[in-house]
Image (cartoon, coloured by chain):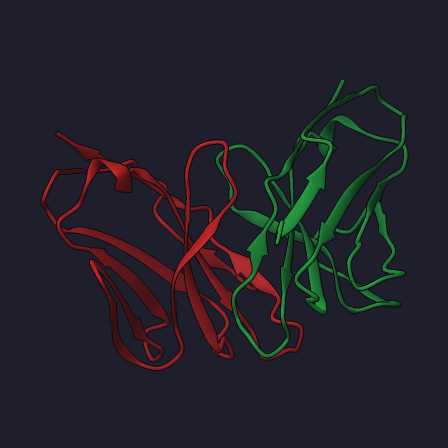
Amino acid sequence: QKEVEQNSGPLSVPEGAIASLNCTYSDRGSQSFFWYRQYSGKSPELIMSIYSNGDKEDGRFTAQLNKASQYVSLLIRDSQPSDSATYLCAVTGTGTASKLTFGTGTRLQVTL
Amino acid sequence: NAGVTQTPKFRILKIGQSMTLQCTQDMNHNYMYWYRQDPGMGLKLIYYSVGAGITDKGEVPNGYNVSRSTTEDFPLRLELAAPSQTSVYFCASLWGASDTQYFGPGTRLTVL
């Protein structure tokens, strides 16, 4: 059973702070790693993808991958109230068809 | 481009009824997926398709059927609806050379 684990939160951070979201996965064969943002009542939206160990930065977002520890994280710098959402970690395995296994998501609240 | 569209947006079914959730994409994507999302949970893969005429089971296929007669359409059929199928259903599509799944707006289904 492939599993993706996330702390459900809520994670509360003040506006302007750094939010750190974490994810672990059980399948060592996982090849691609994604962070999706989901606002309440809406569909998931891809914000970051990462494939190799290390950091990947895109604007205020940084994804970090450590395959040896089977750990993925997302840092959000200068957090804004509009970042308040649920963040879903997802991974694909060794099979074809880019099938995603999702974590349960971490709810982030950015407070004024 | 409309992207991925789903109908209906909301539906209430009685136990034992059947229905079809419609999904259409206009991006000429070869891969399509059906997920369900229960309250406070991540998304679970029901069925997927790598092209017209080709479908396969995901993590939670029981109680559902799919078909893929065209590239654009990927309907999900519920036979003999049960309360356990109360959920939000998302359809997604992906172009095989990419890694970004595009999600539809979802169908909120309640079975009473």
Residue A18 in the image: x percent, y percent?
A: 13, 51
Place of residue B32 in the rendered image (x, y in percent of width and height, measured from the top left): 70, 61
Horizontal side of A101 relative to A53 (left or right) equals right
**Which residue shows up at 38% across the image and 51% down it?**
A6
Horizontally, is A103 left or right of B63 in the view? left
Quadrant occupied by the N terminus of chain A: bottom right
Q: Colour of chain B?
A: green
Q: Is residue B46 above or below residue B9?
A: below
Residue B10 shows in the view: yes
Q: Count the marks: how many?
A: 0
Q: Is residue B103 left or right of residue B55?
A: left
Question: Looking at this view, is B34 or A106 the one in front?
Answer: B34
Tell me, by letter, which chain the rendering colours red. A
Q: Quadrant of residue B49?
A: bottom right
Q: Residue at x 89, y 31 (%)?
A: B18
- Residue at coordinates 89% horizontally, 37% vertically from top-left? B79
**Foreground residue among B14 and A40:** A40
Please say whether residue B59 is visible from this viewpoint. no
Residue A30, given in percent of the width and then of the height, sits at 50, 75
Residue A75 in which image quadrant: bottom left
Examine the rendered structure and indicate whether residue B62 appears above or below residue B32.
above
Instruction: Look at the picture and state if A46 lies above or below A58.
Output: above
Rendered residue at 50%/72% (across/down): A27
Q: Position of residue A49 (x, y in %)?
A: 40, 68
Position of A97 relative to B33 (above/below): below
Q: Which image quarter holds the C terminus of chain A?
A: top left
